[in-house]
Image (spheres, rainbow, N blue to C red):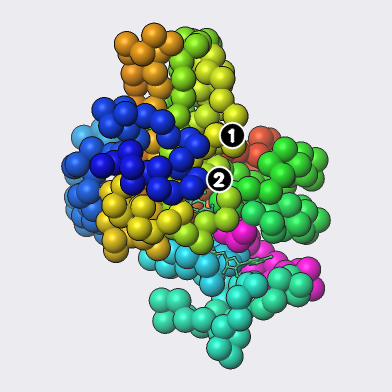
Amino acid sequence: MLSATIAAHPAAAAAITLRQRHSLRPRQPLRVPIGAAAPRRRMETARPSVVKAVASQGVPAVPPKLSFPILVNSCTGKMGKAVAEAAVSAGLQLVPVSFSATEVPDGKLKICDREIRIHDPSESEKILPSIMEEYPDLIVVDYTVPDAVNANAELYCKLGLPVVMGTTGGNRQLLHKTVQDANIYAVISPQMGKQVVAFLAAMEIMAGQFPDAFSGYKLEVMESHQATKLDVSGTAKAVISCFQKLGVSFDMDEVKLVRDPEEQVNVVGVPEEHLEGHAFHMYHLTSPDGTVSFEFQHNVCGRSIYAEGTVDAAMFLYTKIQSGAGKKLYDMIDVLREGNMR
Ligand SMILES: NC(=O)C1=CN([C@@H]2O[C@H](COP(=O)(O)OP(=O)(O)OC[C@H]3O[C@@H](n4cnc5c(N)ncnc54)[C@H](O)[C@@H]3O)[C@@H](O)[C@H]2O)C=CC1
Ligand SMILES: O=C(O)C1=N[C@H](C(=O)O)C[C@H](O)C1
């Protein structure tokens, strides 16, 4: 029985006291590998004749292709590798240098037939200035670890290096203050996937327009990620803060984290092939008298939705820099709002 399976997991026992009809278990269709959707057609693959025809019907033509240097920190991680590959396939110039706490053979890594030299993070302050000189329009993308967020941001700020910060965790308030004070161009977001960003935007709009609409409701949150994930989902925290504005009382430490692969497959419904990279989120609300319930969920398999969104963010930032925009610190809702996500 489901409740027995959940209770067998120590972290779950305290958090879940639901009967099966209110269970956090995704419904059966969620077992379909969501990440297996057909790859999106990329802008630059559209035939010129098609683009011209569409443009002549009053629909804006495809904007000119952007190309600028991008350094991914760290290419040895799951997200870093996915972003580096997406950047190359979008026609960006992948800088053949990265930093990592993980040792790789000969200090080199192959990404899309390119050789990336991997340096220890302690060398970044020494190496980055010369990279910036060699690649004048450089943008750095950060997918490292929560513990490195604030120190990395400080370094980018010190160097005046524009950054797309996808890494979650660390001291977020300090992160924003550091970047704001240094006045560097940056996109910071715990969530880069276009459709999830849209969901987050809708939550923020709802919270802004209908504060306390869910006052008195009980919230339960479950998030399942690969066992190597070090922190509580930054996306879940952002969604929860909207529920708090909607009047729900909830402590961040009440989030039920699922990191056990067996539970992920058998209870949450994560396809086995995505145990190494998935993000299943479930938010369940119940009215005080138990007669009304709401469920919101977003389940992502793989990394491509984030990698594509990160490249969109880098392109957005590059365009802002080139236009000398006065506003410098952005989030992904800004990127989405301006129609900059492919
Ligand atoms: N914003 C978004 O949409 C998304 C954010 N993330 C976040 O991105 C971060 C990375 O996730 P994964 O790639 O899955 O982790 P991972 O564990 O696969 O990769 C992290 C990499 O960072 C390296 N590293 C550690 N300390 C470093 C330092 N000081 N400098 C440079 N490299 C360092 C490690 O050696 C490792 O290769 C996490 O915080 C995760 O929550 C992940 C997916 C989407
Ligand atoms: O580590 C991950 O995998 C993810 N991290 C982000 C988060 O913490 O919210 C985004 C997504 O959940 C995947």
Magenta-highlighted residues: 125-145
Total of numbered circles in the picture?
2
Ligand 1 quadrant in view: bottom right
Return the residue at label 2. Answer: 232
143 in the magenta segment: yes
Image point (20%, 49%), residue name? 32
- Whole-percent x, y for residue 6 in the image: 37, 44
Q: Nearer the viewer, residue 79 or 124?
A: 79
- Count neighbours of disc 1 (C-alpha within 10 A) and say few if under 14, some if 14 to 19, many if 20 or more: few
Q: Quadrant of the N terminus?
A: top left
Q: In this view of the protein, can residue 336 be seen by the observer?
A: no
Q: Which residue is mark 1?
A: 252
Separation of disc 1 and disc 2 at Cα? 9 Å
Check contact, mark 1 vs mark 2: CB within 8 A: yes
CB of residue at label 2: within 8 Å of ligand 2? yes
Q: Secondary structure at mark 2?
A: loop
Query: How far across and down, in percent of the image, does residue 188 sit?
Result: 60, 44
Q: Residue at x 39, y 9 (%)?
A: 289
> Is any part of residue 3 visible from this angle?
yes
Q: Is residue 213 left or right of residue 141?
A: left
